[in-house]
Amino acid sequence: MVFDPFDRYDITPPDPIFFISSQAAADQRPEKVDLTIGIYKTAELKSMVFKSIREAEKKLLENETNKDYLSISGHQALIDGSIDLVFGKDHCERAICGIQALGGTGALCLGANLLAETLKMPVYVSKPTWVNHHNVFSSAGFMVKDYFYYDQKTQSLNIDAFFEALNRAEKGSVVVLHGCCHNPSGADPDLEQWKEISDLCKARQLIPFFDLAYQGFGQGLEQDVRAIRLFAKDGHSMLVAQSFSKNLGLYGERVGTLLVLTSEKSGVISHLKAIARASYSNPPRHGGLIAAHVLSDPHLRSIWEDELNYMRQRVNSTREHLADALAKSCPNHDFSYLKERNGMFCYLDLTKDHIESLKTEKAIYLTQSGRINVTGLNEQNVVYVADSIASVLE
Ligand code: LMR
């Protein structure tokens, strides 16, 4: 008999976000509403390519002379653009090591593997958090622990429990923080609370690792990095995983960066390059070049910022429409908290049974946790969704 090493693999559960999103895609009912995966949809509920990106691609095609590899650390203009976007043009004196990554997830992985080389402490993620945080850090060998963050019973940020968890965290642990637009809750600390978080991280010698996947979707490009800049000013050695999936619409092109702010630049970049080389060798060229072009060309940059502003306004107004429609359809339930959220995600205060009924009876798809992507709503379907929620709540 031939030795078959593959006969010992059990089937692992599918990724919950991609699984529910594929179920939604396969549903042919005309009234279907897909509120699952975090891909921005237009008012016509279509995916889109940014105009700024199309123009950058056109220029790239006209001038492209080769498809050579990028260097292992990626396209320097993208890294520079990302550093400016995150830390500002006149960022601090401290050393920033940057490397292009395969989207936000790739950036998190690079950071996790870098930390894993020297650190044996736990990694703390918010409860709840983006499901993939657990995979990324446990795959790198870390014990992943939760810090209490958002209370789904009261639909509010539990900042005291968060502070308490930081106070209890083992010195030298890593704390994963959502730079803005917390995924899945949409509830972010205010600046004063961020200051307290920064002070606690300092006092407890915790390593902040910011996941920045939605810059521009909360309050604006500058406002959405206020927490990160505050931490930088406070002198933290820290990491930032920047994703361009959402704010440049480059989901499948896999464009992101990992930025490491450190007082000692020396070896970090060489280790990151070694990790990248062993895993995928060099990052994708096309996405890196077009993203860098949009960030650095003043004309394209201004088109992009207008596009992003428009998207943010649509996200905010859609969330408000939903809250208003729910107030009418479900007068005995309080959904007003939706108006205070940031970004495309928020929770609907529903049980698993409600969520299942919405799917089977109404063709409305949410992730299992009750998270919705509000851009799956528009003026045509928002009342249908609110009425359907009222019917399952009855
Ligand atoms: C999401 O949270 O829906 C997105 O970030 C897509 C993903 O990779 O999970």
Image (cartoon, rainbow, N blue to C red):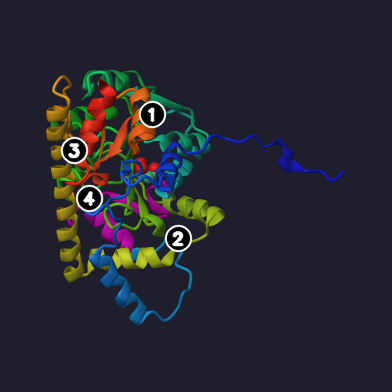
Closer to us: mark 2 or mark 1?
1
Label 4 with label 3: CB-CB less than 8 Å = no
Residue drawn at the location 14% of the way across and 39% of the way down = 321
Q: What amino acid does circle 2 point to? A: Pro
- Residue type, mark 4 in image: Phe
Toward the right, the furthest residue is 1
Residue at image coords 26%, 18%: 153
* Separation (CA) of disc 4 from disc 3: 41 Å
- Look at the image and say whether residue 124 sits in the magenta stretch: no
Q: CA distance from mark 2 to mark 3?
A: 44 Å
Residue topped by disc 3: 383
Q: Secondary structure at mark 2?
A: loop
Q: Earlier in the sequence, mark 2 or mark 4?
A: 4
Nearer the viewer's eye, disc 1 or disc 4? 1
Q: Nearer the viewer, residue 31 or 369?
A: 31
Cα distance in 3D space between marks 2 and 4: 23 Å
User: 168 and 333: which one is in front?
Assistant: 333
Q: Residues within 10 Å of mark 1 (few under 14, many from 20)?
A: some
Q: Is mark 1 within 8 Å of ligand 1?
A: no
Under circle 1, the secondary element is helix
At mark 3, the secondary structure is: helix
Range shown magenta: 77-105
Give the residue pinned by disc 2. Answer: 283
* Nearer-N-terminus badge (3/1): 1
Q: Which circle marks residue 356 in the picture?
A: 1
